Image (tube, rainbow, N blue to C red):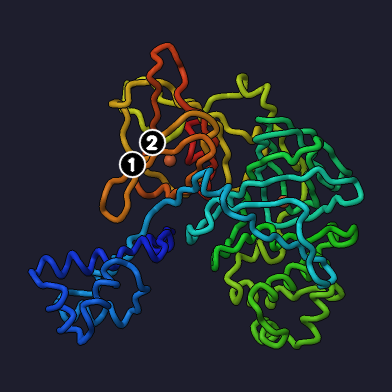
Amino acid sequence: MALYSSHLLQYPELKLGERIRDARQRQGLTLRQLASRLGTSSARLSQIENERVRVHLQDVLEVAEALNIPLDALIPTDVTLPYQITRDTDRRARPPKPTLLAYPDGSAGRSSPHQYWSLANLFLGRHLEPVLGRIMPIDEHELCFCYHDEEEFAFALRGTLEFRIKTPEGEHREELVRGDSVYFRSDLPHCFRSLEAEPAETIHVFCSPSVSTAGGLDWAHSRAIVYTGDGGSNLQRRIGQKLMLLREEHGWSLDRVARSAGLSGRQVLGIERGERAIPLDAALNLARAFGKPLRELIGLTVARPPYYFVQRSKDISSSPIRRRRTPVERPHAPPSKTCQPLLGDFPAKEMYPCFLRMLNVDLETLTLHEHHGQEFIYVLEGELELTTYAGDEEVHETLRAGDSCYIDSTVPHLLRSWTRNPYSETSAEVLDVFWCPLGEAYLFDT
Ligand SMILES: [Fe+2]
Ligand SMILES: [Fe+2]
């Protein structure tokens, strides 16, 4: 669970020319001397050192050999970082991720009317998929109900939104204003739209028992299935659709799926079309072959109320404060933050969104902590400092409003913030979504 430092690098940041010049000068060699060892001209070597030409790996190897130094003196080795920061300004400069919705009959997908930006795309092995959404004001007839694994949390950053969900008890509609959030079963057909003329802005975090992070794919939406009114409630149909999507995602042929399942191609086709029930032994074989838990393949959970929970911004001040089991304050020090879960009594499986208010306290009373799981942190207001590790070095990163960070919580970390204003009680406000399969009892004191 990590991010490779080289994934953050662009070629110019390798600073190869500078590294070669430094290495040459450390050995007291002139341009001409090194050039002659390399069998090239001083003019070409000078171009390399001044970054005027793109260097091939072969050139770097030859320089390393000529100077008798290891290759990693010129090309920095990869460090694994237990965090990925997404700055608001960088995110805004990027185009949105194309998000495709698949039709259950296997016909070509359609693009989502809304736009999404991944906020943790480089973090390998993440269990949550946080995205920033721009939710468009669309007409009733353009509404597209879709469903996907397994739970979703959406927080309204700007504008007024409509959230609709089709449950076994009928369709529900909620209006969300800035600061409201909804936690819901995303395996039920649902949709969003902006109720104002302008797009609304949202944070969505998707949680599914297994995640594919290959290629930084926005899995949650690219795998969403459009609800066409017949597939959502019928289990056999849904398993068929799921199997079809998994086969497409993996680029497997029908034959390959059939072989893995121990079935014939015709049988697999029948299952995909929802005409045939899947034998349990075939389901187990397929779950293994796709690297998915059985629960994700066959949807073991039956939809029962509550289907969703809405936390209203106006009620946040009266929502209960919970104490974390792994506090960052030293014993007997005053609390450094308050933590209010945003899911009410919703029986969340593995994802716990919280609203954190960082209190303006003496920073010396705080220590790094570590705990099982991962965290997605989004700064709503103020400025914070994240302390954690890059390789074996302690690092400090400043996060401002709109910035976010995905971290591996098993690596020691600390969020702290302060304000110069001695009268201010709060120094920053943060959305913190924990992924923790050990559950609520592990995260919070009872
Ligand atoms: Fe969704
Ligand atoms: Fe933490």
Residue 351 higher or lower than 121, as above or below: above
Residue 152 higher or lower than 322, as above or below: below
Residue that appears at 43% across and 11% down: 423
Question: What is the spatial separation of the Cα atoms under label 1 and label 2, in whole angstroms?
Answer: 6 Å
The reply to whether the C-beta atoms of the residues labelled 1 and 2 are less than 8 Å apart is yes
Secondary structure beneath dot 1 equals: strand
Residue that appears at 79% across and 48% down: 191
Front residue of 221/75: it is: 75
User: Which residue lies under the disc numbered 1?
Assistant: 396
> What's under tag 2, amino acid-wise?
Glu
Percent across and percent down for residue 262 are 68, 85
Front residue of 201/296: it is: 201
Percent across and percent down for residue 96 are 64, 55
**Residue 308 falls left or right of residue 97:** right
Name the outermost residue toward the left. Answer: 28
> What's under tag 1, amino acid-wise?
His
**Would the CB of label 1 be found within 8 Å of ligand 2?**
no
Name the image quarter holding residue 4. Answer: bottom left
Residue that appears at 49% across and 48% down: 86
Residue that appears at 23% across and 65% down: 19
User: Which residue lies under the disc numbered 2?
Assistant: 385
**Residue 357 falls left or right of residue 53:** right
Q: Residues within 10 Å of mark 2 (few under 14, many from 20)?
A: some
Secondary structure beneath dot 2 equals: strand
Q: Earlier in the sequence, mark 1 or mark 2?
A: 2
**Residue 19 falls left or right of residue 95:** left
Percent across and percent down for residue 332 are 32, 21
